[in-house]
Image: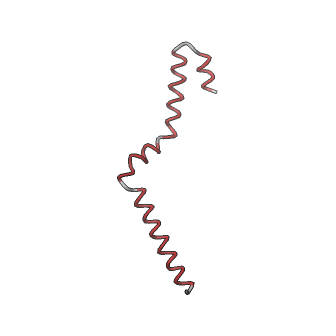
Amino acid sequence: MDINILRGLAIIFCMIAFFGIVFWAYSSKRKCSFDEAANLPFADEFAHRSTVNAATKNGNKEMGEKQNV
């Protein structure tokens, strides 16, 4: 086989893989799961705030201070 045929096949394979990934990423079926994954970094922050607020409301100020560390 000529090296140019291999290069051509490699380019075709890479283009098919690229368009497959783009189609998968922008598929409307995946929107819900991608939106959920995009909000994961904020989920811990909200859980942390609610734990600190609950501890300080219950009068357990020491627990609230430990959560802030």
31 versus 21 height, above or below = above
16 versus 64 height, above or below = below
Residue at 43% x, 56% y is 25
Is 68 on the left or on the right of 57, as rendered?
right
Residue at 54% x, 18% y is 55
Residue at 60% x, 19% y is 63
Q: How is the image coloured?
A: secondary structure
Q: Residue 18's spot in the image, x, y percent?
A: 46, 65
Residue at 64% x, 27% y is 69
State the residue lying farthest toward the left.
28
State the residue lying farthest toward the bottom.
2
Q: Residue 20's spot in the image, x, y percent?
A: 43, 64
60 versus 39 height, above or below = above
State the residue lying farthest toward the front.
1
Quadrant housing the N terminus:
bottom right
Q: Residue 65's spot in the image, x, y percent?
A: 62, 21
Q: Residue 67's spot in the image, x, y percent?
A: 60, 25
Count every numbered label the image shows and give the total: 0
